[in-house]
Structure formats: structure tokens, C-alpha cells
Amino acid sequence: MKLSHTQVDTVYLGQHKVYVKRDDLLHPEFSGNKARKFAYFLDNDFPLVKQLIGYGSPQANSLYSLSALAKLKGWRLDFYVDHLPHYLTANPCGNYRAAQALGANIIDLSRRADRDGLDCDSYIRQRVLTGSDEQLLVPEGGRCAFAEPGVAQLAKEIASWKYAEGLTKLVVFLPSGTGTTALYLQKQFLTLDPCISVMTCAVVGGDDYLRKQFFELEEDEALHPQIVPAAKRYHFGKLYLEFYQMWHELKATGIEFELLYDPLGWLCLKSCWQQGFSKPVLYLHQGGLLGNQSMLPRYQRKYGEIFGE
């Protein structure tokens, strides 16, 4: 099971040369940042744990990876979602279908009589957790201190690669949800190699939301990565023509990217170039390609004729 030491490829977007760290080539069940975030759980024994608890979107990469983790460890996964769309239950696909196949128990909170207006995190903490060592809660997207060891390994791989390439400076660029990977990478590089810095953009909730996530994990703002603002506010999961155009442009690199995070990441990177940014860039491919099974048909239905699909 390959969970580290991925290759770095070189691609060109227009006249711009970009290195791509291929974490999408990690084991499919833990593709990309989930292999890094969940490495601690994979590498260590938890003899008392019987129930793994998570929450998020029914198409989240973390749902699939937590399902695989639970199966490997012999645990039961209870994964809470705010709402399960009827079309998804009627036509399972992507991460939702893969998680079901691995035995995940996906719980629709909209059907719970005792929800009382609580969000998933609050519901779990108030209604589900008992304080027992048999329960293990992994916050949404793996946003917790347990993610740091795996991201530290990723930072070491990148620093070693930079040294081997003879680069004096390097910017690691990645789009962020909770910002966990970006934050822990930046913290690691300040010790490993201060000539490497991290730039990211907020895909979920906007820049203020992302800053809040950073502060919840690390109070020292000096350790936070740089946030690149998007050209406009985008709503997470909504379809945008410029995202689909960017995804099609990326196809020419010969590497498949996912449709939820990567289009905004590359658009923000292009914006940096337009403003004169010129440092060498390593783009972190965080996997998540299984999500294209649900996202691509949505884009094709809305914009397919534009691209002859």
C-alpha cells in the first residue's frame, strides 16, 4: 500500500513551468491528502477503539478514506451528514458509493428527531460521544493534531526533492478546505527549510473562514501560510463555467485533476502569475479523483455543449 514518496512531474501551463507533487498516485483508498492526514491512524494501534466517528459531505474524500481505515482496523464507521440528497441515495456514485461498499454507516441528521437544530459536530459531541475509549472522533476533513505527523512526512519529501533539484527557493501551492495540510506544511518548512513557503486559497467558506481554521489549529499567525484571494466569492460545490474551462485547460498537461478544489487553485495561481509572481512552484495534487464521478456529469449536463460533449 503506497502511502508516501510520490513522484514529482513537470508540466507547463501556457509559458509557466510548474512542478506537480503526485499525491494522487497514492493508494486509491487514501489518495492524496487523506493518506497524509490519516497516516497516524494507519501507523498506530488503538486496541480499545471499536467505533470510528466522522462527519462531512456524503461525497467527501474523507468519507471514503475513513471507511477504508475502519475496514482495515476492524472498526465500525458512523459518518454523519447534514442531509442525504434523494438523487444520491437513488443513484449512488463516487465516494458515497465506495464508502457504502466498504461498510460505512452513513447517518442523515435531517432524519433525526433529536437533532434540535444542531450541526454535525455539535450533534456528535452532545448526542453521540460518551467519553468511552471505544470511540474515536475524526473532525471534518481530518482537521486535528493527529494529521501533523503525516503532513510532516510530506514536508520532508518536498524538502529533499528541492535539495536534489538544486532550487534555492520554492513555493508549495495547494487549494484548501479546512487548511490543515497547508498549515502543517508551513510549520514544518519553517524548521526544515525556510526557503520553502506555502501559498493556498480558500475553496470552502472564504478567506475569513480559512483564517479561523488556521487559528483553531495554531494560535501563532507567523506560522500560517499565505492565503491568495480569489477573484470573486465562489460557493463551495456550485458549478462555475470558469472552473470547467480551467479543468479542460489542465487536461492538456496529461494529468487529471479533480473538479471541486483544483480549478480554483489553478485560477488563483494564474492570477499570481498575472501579478508578476515568478518563484518556482510545486503544486500539490491532493487526489480526490473519485469525486469526479459525481462532479463531471453535473458539469457536462450544464456546460457540455460548449466543449462538444
Image (cartoon, rainbow, N blue to C red):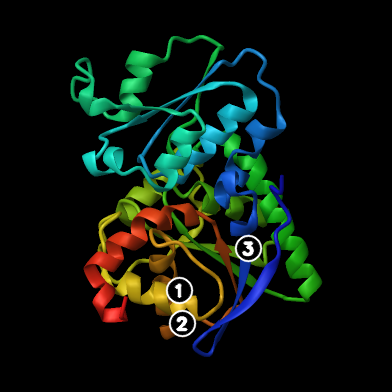
Q: Mark 1 is on which residue type?
A: Leu
Percent x, y for residue 48? 63, 12
Work out how far the residue at label 3 is from the one at label 2, CA to CA, in angstroms. Answer: 22 Å
**In the rendered image, which residue does mark 3 sit on?**
22
**Front residue of this view, candidates 224 and 180:** 180
**Front residue of this view, candidates 219 and 9:** 9
Q: Residue at x 38, y 46 (%)?
A: 93
- Which quadrant does the N terminus fall into? top right
> Does the CB distance between marks 3 and 2 fall below 8 Å?
no
Earlier sequence position, callout 3 versus callout 2? 3
Q: Mark 3 is on which residue type?
A: Arg
| Residue with the most extreme bottom position | 15
Work out how far the residue at label 1 is from the one at label 3, CA to CA, in angstroms. Answer: 18 Å
**Front residue of this view, candidates 105 and 234:** 105
> Does the CB distance between marks 2 and 1 fall below 8 Å?
yes
Q: Residue at x 37, y 37 (%)?
A: 56
Earlier sequence position, callout 1 versus callout 3? 3
**In the rendered image, which residue does mark 2 sit on?**
273
**Front residue of this view, candidates 11 and 155:** 11
Q: Quadrant of residue 122?
A: top left
**In the rendered image, which residue does mark 1 sit on?**
269
Label 3 crowd bin: few (<14), some (14–19), many (20+), radius 10 Å = many
Is 3 situated left or right of 160 in this image? left
Percent x, y for residue 196? 64, 65
Work out how far the residue at label 2 is from the one at label 1, CA to CA, in angstroms. Answer: 6 Å
Q: Residue at x 44, y 64 (%)?
A: 262
Q: Which element type, helix, strand or loop, lies under badge 1? A: helix
